[in-house]
Amino acid sequence: MTTPFDENTPPARRPGLFARLRSSFLTGLVVIAPVGLTIWLVWTLMGWVDGVVLPLVPEQFKPEPYIGINLRGVGIIFFLIFTIIIGWVAKGLMGRSLIRWGESLVDRMPVVRSIYSGAKQIAETVFAQSERSFEKACLIEYPRKGIWAIGFVSTQTKGEVSRRTPPDGPMMSIFVPTTPNPTSGFLLFIPKEEVIELDMSVEDAAKLVISAGLVYPNAKDPSQPVKD
């Protein structure tokens, strides 16, 4: 059924050439930008490592005089080989003895001792295989009731903090990251019954924090957008 007004309704206008070119350009940027940024970061990191490591390598071990070109990334190979050798030596009896002797010397230096102990603790936390990472992602009411924030369950509270908190039940150590930099945040001690554990992985929760809520995980198919 039609009405007299249908005859006066103008047909839908097709987008012009400029609009189509603009749409294609923006789509191309979405595809190119992540790839280009990743390549640029990797290339820059390789150059930085080469600039730091290669000056320490003897000339007879550098490949440039033999092949005639400067290969970027050679410094990373030398760094990996050197680190593996140091780790292999450090696992032995002689290596452990040398480390203990060196640390005993560092303990006698007031300023150096503080810097070394802090750097060692950070390195052991980040790189040591025996250290535990965040267990699960969770929701907590922060900074006040009625406002929810994503956190990461570190561990159950122990030691003096556990002894001095009210004995109503177990406490959890929760790290609440900031957006868009999840490496900074707040350490909170919260009763376990007030912590809501999430099904999403820690990696998916981190993506949600970094993207400021724009990237939501999909439990059934992560490649598809999240459904309400």
Image (cartoon, rainbow, N blue to C red):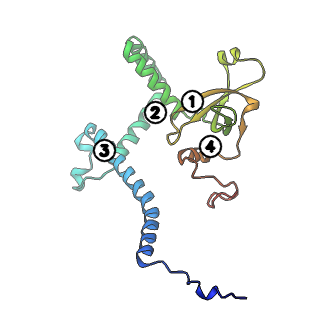
Of callouts 4 and 1, the N-terminal one: 1
Residue 192: x and y, percent? 74, 29
Residue 145: x and y, percent? 69, 33
Residue type at mark 1 is Phe
> Which type of secondary structure does the marked residue at label 1 adopt?
strand
Say above or below: 6 vs 106.
below
Disc number lying in front (1 or 2): 1
> Which type of secondary structure does the marked residue at label 2 adopt?
helix
Say above or below: 167 vs 152.
above
Q: CA distance from mark 3 to mark 4?
A: 33 Å
Of callouts 2 and 3, the N-terminal one: 3
Residue 142: x and y, percent? 64, 33
Disc number lying in front (1 or 3): 1
Residue type at mark 3 is Asp
Of callouts 1 and 2, the N-terminal one: 2
Question: Label 4 belongs to which residue?
Answer: 202
Question: Label 3 belongs to which residue?
Answer: 50
Q: Nearer the viewer, residue 50 or 20?
A: 20
Say above or below: 213 vs 2.
above
**Residue at left offset 76%, top offset 31%:** 193
Q: CA distance from mark 1 to mark 3?
A: 36 Å
Of callouts 4 and 2, the N-terminal one: 2
Question: Label 1 belongs to which residue?
Answer: 186
Q: CA distance from mark 4 to mark 1?
A: 17 Å
Pointers 3 and 4 in contact (C-beta within 8 Å): no
Of callouts 1 and 3, the N-terminal one: 3
From the viewer's perspective, tell me whether residue 12 is left or right of residue 20: right
Of callouts 3 and 4, the N-terminal one: 3
From the viewer's perspective, tell me whether residue 105 is left or right of residue 135: left
Question: Label 2 belongs to which residue?
Answer: 87
> Which type of secondary structure does the marked residue at label 3 adopt?
helix
